[in-house]
Amino acid sequence: MLETAAAYTNRPDPMASIRGVDTNNKSAVREAAEEFEAVFLNTMLQNMFTGLNEGGTWGGGTGSDAWQDLLIDEYARSISKAGGIGLADSVERELLNLQEGTL
């Protein structure tokens, strides 16, 4: 039922996607914001699929866990690129506010 602590340490850190972003480059800011949203969505989707019986979409053979992780990552990136859930817009706005010193 409960996942081990090691399972959480293997997941990407959303904050890592926005550290060190050149806030003077607006396309880099947008890209970092979308990456942040994709990592966040990946975490949510991973939790959504936790505990499902083996088989179905993922199969049950060797490598099915890797296949599941790759497919969920691609789902998250696709959702983010298609407009996402609005998180990238908020992150982009905050990064630009930090650049302008308006916070």
Image (spheres, grey):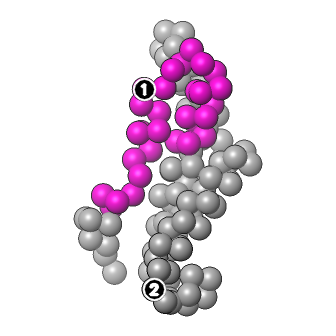
From this view, report whether residue 71 is shown above or below residue 26: below
Q: Name the residue rendered at 26%, 70% in the picture.
A: 4
Instruction: Determine the CA span between mark 2 and mark 1.
Output: 38 Å
| 93 sits left or right of 81 in the view | left
In the rendered image, the residue lying farthest to the right is 82
Q: Position of residue 19 (x, y in %)?
A: 42, 31
In the rendered image, the residue lying farthest to the left is 5
Q: Secondary structure at mark 2?
A: loop
Tag 2: Cα neighbours inside 10 Å, few (<14), some, or many (≥20)?
few
The reply to whether residue 97 is in sight is no
Q: Position of residue 26 (x, y in %)?
A: 63, 21
For the N terminus, the image quarter is: bottom left
Q: Name the residue rendered at 57%, 49% in the picture.
A: 38
Q: Secondary structure at mark 1?
A: loop
* Residue 73 image-quadrant placement: bottom right
> Is residue 26 found inside the magenta-colored segment of the image?
yes
Q: Name the residue rendered at 56%, 87% in the picture.
A: 59
> Is residue 33 found inside the magenta-colored segment of the image?
yes
Q: Earlier in the sequence, mark 2 or mark 1?
A: 1
Magenta highlight range: 8-36
**Residue 20 — which label?**
1
Q: Name the residue rendered at 50%, 81% in the picture.
A: 64
The reply to whether residue 60 is in sight is yes
**Residue 62 — which label?**
2
**Residue type at the position of mark 2:** Thr
Q: Position of residue 16 (x, y in %)?
A: 41, 39
**Residue 32 — which label?**
none
In the rendered image, the residue lying farthest to the front is 62
From this view, report whether residue 61 is shown above or below residue 96: below
**Residue type at the position of mark 1:** Gly
Tag 1: Cα neighbours inside 10 Å, few (<14), some, or many (≥20)?
few
